[in-house]
Amino acid sequence: MALRMWASSTANALRVSSTVSRTNFSLSRCFSTVLEGLKYASSHEWVKHEGSVATIGITDHAQDHLGEVVFVDLPDSGTSVSHGSSFGAVESVKATSDINSPISGEIVEVNTKLSETPGLINSSPYEDGWMIKVKPSNPSELESLLGAKEYTKLCDEEEIH
């Protein structure tokens, strides 16, 4: 009971919603940041669509589960990516994971900073840790991606299982 009270008060102080019952306890979002205004793939990549370009990276939830990122393998500009297909890999101290493209299109820019400082994915997954910028070939694919609330729910469900 004391642990539940501590967790509940900590969640309130951090402004994280909590659910307390006699049988279970969970903290929403597991302290990962999910930003409004982005689209999310169920494979834990995010997309920020601005004008004719979409910026893609992995989510805070994904980088948290990977642990310290030590190497990033990204394609060259001019390469095509396909919705749901791998375009690169992230290697951490725990594992190597493929990165899937949430949309199809042509890569117009690659974040070259990640080759020198792959830890930017951990420290700034939505800003400095972006991976590629794509000119979408099928913008309607963005409509099939999750919004912030749906992605948060997906992450919460994964943590329960």
Image: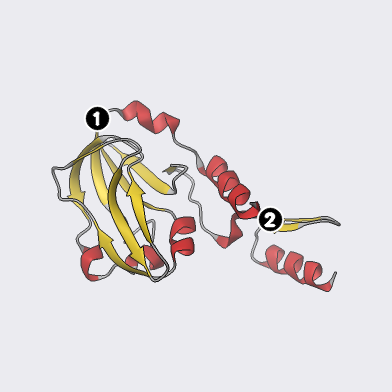
- Answer left or right for 62 relative to 19: left
Instruction: Report the front residue among 147 and 36.
Output: 147
Q: Earlier in the sequence, mark 2 or mark 1?
A: 2
Q: Residues within 10 Å of mark 1 (few under 14, many from 20)?
A: some
Q: Which residue is pictured at 76% across the width and 71% down the height?
A: 6
In which quadrant of the rendered image does the N terminus lie? bottom right
- Answer above or below: position of 124 versus 44: below
Q: Nearer the observer, disc 2 or disc 1?
A: 1
Position of residue 23 measured from the top left corner of the image (x, y, whole percent): 83, 56
**Quadrant position of residue 96:** bottom left
Disc 1 marks which amino acid?
A: Ser
**Res. 129 in view:** no
Q: Which residue is mark 2?
A: 17
Position of residue 116 measured from the top left corner of the image (x, y, whole percent): 22, 70
- Answer above or below: position of 69 versus 142: below
Disc 2 marks which amino acid?
A: Ser
Position of residue 124 measured from the top left corner of the image (x, y, whole percent): 38, 63
Furthest-left residue in this view:
78
| Image color mode | secondary structure
Q: Which residue is mark 1?
A: 137
**Mark 2 vs mark 1, CA separation in Å:** 39 Å
